[in-house]
Amino acid sequence: MAVIARWCIRHRLVTVLLWVFMCAGVGAAAVAAGTTYSNDYEVPGTESGRAAELLADGFPALSGDTGTIVWHTETGSVRATEVQQRMSGTLDSVAALDSVADVTGPYQAAGAAQISPDGRTAYATVTFDQRSGAVPDQHVEQVVQTAQAARGGGVQVELGGTAIGPMEAPSGHLAETVGVAVAALVLFLAFGSLAASLLPIATALVSVGTAYAGIVLLGHVMTVADFAPMLGLLIGLGVGIDYALFIVTRHRKGLRAGLTVPDAAREAVTTTGRAVVFAGATVCIALLGMLILRLDFLNGVAIAASLTVVLTVAAAVTLLPALLSFIGMRALSGRERRRLAERGPEPELPTGFAARWSAFVERRPKLLALVAVAVMAVLALPTFSLHLGTSDQGNNPATSTTRQAYDLLASGGPEQGGEGGFGPGVNGPLTLVSRPDSGADRLTMDRLPEALRGAEGIASVGPVTYNASGDTAVLTVVPESSPQSKSTSELVDRLRDDLVPAALDGGSLKVHIGGVTAGYDDFAEIIVGKLPLFVGVVIALGCLLLLVAFRSIGIPLKAAAMNVAAVASSFGVVVAIFQWGWGSELLGLGPGGPIEPFLPVIMVSVLFGLSMDYQVFLVSRMYEEWLETGDNRRAVRVGLAETSRVINSAAVIMISVFLAFVLSGDRVIAMFGIALAAAVALDAFVLRTLLVPALMHMLGRANWWLPGWLDRRLPKITVEPRSAEASTPVFQRHPSDEEQLVP
């Protein structure tokens, strides 16, 4: 690390230009290549996946993404001549647009059932020629603009469906701007120097910008979820600013100790920079743990997020020292520079709230540990009611066109009180697909609609449709409940286990149930089935890293327990807000609904990685003091007093960045933001600065126990070696220790 730091400082202009050119070059390539993200959650080998494959083979024109154009009249009927002529012309215009494969409207025989019983609401289905985000955004936008041009004259026109939803994503960068602005304010309050407060922001923006463009290019070589860039941006800004904060803090400490600017920067990278690399490695290991699930959809998320973390770490240990050498002594505030010039270097003793808090935890570890456990347990309670499933467009903000289209289809308009609509199930019909091999199979398939009609939970059953060659049949079943409802998931299970097998009566015909809800349920089942293995691998790898770094059995075990507690409690907060709906409408995130099935895996990866960050920075200082004194109480007291302030500052920055992403208006990104913000807040303010030191005081020397045979076999690494300016212990070892810690 010293060699890297020395080179970057000596060639500071070259280092800065290399980063600028790389960011600009990758960004230009991303703009030229365009985006190819995916929102396809289907898993090959599942029943819904097989249904999608059969549908794509037998009905290629119907296998793309779909959209819905819904129109409603305040008075009169959608069958009125004026309304019919206007909307028929609109649908013809839409059908002629690029990427549109088919439009089925209510004024043709195939769509006769697409007019509500009261005659005041109708809809048309628009099928695109591609799926999974492959349809160019401008083509979808043309459909939206063409349909909305028919509004007026007492006719309300709204659009919904899987293809239309992404168009409502905000095009601005309000969330990122707010998060960065708050982070800059916190940094300025912590440093008192404008130059020093801007460097972590600049470093994070350059690295995250490069990573964002890299993720765009990554989407051309592998499956990358449509939310992966925003997730990477969220994680990158949080950890990037934090990592730079730790290094700048150490650099400023070196300057106050009398080191020159180059020496202080080199020492900061050599010491804290190593801890940053170690912390970043733990985050990447936790993220790459998703690869063991062997799901293409999550593989892209794991690699995209890991790429972001790698670039933020690289920028922190290369670009940042170069920038520090540029600003020189301005890393210190004006008052600090004057004090240094007048009095020279002075020993820095932990004072103020951090020192008082450290001593307070030492005096009452049992009581404080009990309080911390109670807080975490209460917040974790909602996790037991976690329901994984599809979050449909009924959860979108009430002002969005997709939400209004959803409500019109579900209820037929608010003035009808829900009596004139199609029912919520029309927003997520189930698709039954088969490949009949004989005349007997065709007869069995033709009898299936009658066998399913009137079954519990089924609102309507469409006719069987065969493709041109007659080797593939499709049947649409509309549930009585919404796509995200548990009742719809239960209907999928009954269809697969009871209703369809009974109708087939043991014949050779195989019927596969697909659709949005079935796909999400299958995806959730795969995730839940592999989750124990995934969590076990992530915990084991994290514990192994801490075991090697701190040469202790107790430290890794406590870290694993703390990480599980942070994950459980943060999920409790997510369930309360997004599933129970506590405050979700106030946040502009729509009513409560199920939690996306991929959220647990991604959140476990990210939260385990971020939790390890604070564990590394806190315990590395304690471990350093333990090696010097062999006094556990002193090691815990000193470590907490010296690191709690910077950990809390870093946590405030990360929480601000994460919470700002609630402003994105995207429900999934908002889930990530609130979950990460809650986890970081609990981790920093309850676990690392309260529960962890309290437990370490209670366990005493057992914290650092390691069997001799294991100690001899483990490789020896140092996370954060003692720096030159800190070669003299900060805490002088004499009886006035307690007086120094507690004013």
Image: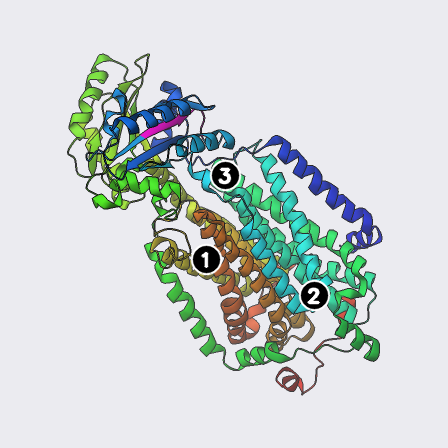
Q: Looking at the image, which is closer to me, 650 or 442?
A: 650
Q: Position of residue 619 (x, y in %)?
A: 60, 66
Give me the C-alpha separation between circle 1 and circle 2.
Answer: 29 Å
| Residue to which mark 3 is pinned | 225
In the rendered structure, which amino acid carries the disc numbered 2? Answer: Thr
Q: Which residues are magenta?
A: 124-131
| Residue to which mark 2 is pinned | 249
Q: Looking at the image, which is closer to me, 381 or 588?
A: 588
Q: How many residues crowd mark 2 within 10 Å: few (<14), some (14–19), many (20+)? A: some
Magenta span has 127? yes
Residue 612, by quadrant, is bottom right
Q: Looking at the image, which is closer to me, 458 or 151?
A: 151
| Residue to which mark 1 is pinned | 567
Q: Is residue 698 left or right of residue 245?
A: left
Q: Position of residue 605 (x, y in %)?
A: 51, 50
Q: Between disc 1 and disc 2, whose residue precedes?
A: 2
Looking at the rendered image, the disc whose residue lies closer to the viewer, 1 or 2, is 2
Q: Is residue 391 left or right of residue 615?
A: left
Can residue 215 be spotted in the picture?
yes
Q: Between disc 1 and disc 3, whose residue precedes?
A: 3
Q: Looking at the image, which is closer to me, 278 or 647?
A: 647
Residue 354, by quadrant, is bottom right
The quarter in which the C terminus is drawn is: bottom right
Magenta span has 450? no
Q: Secondary structure at mark 2?
A: helix
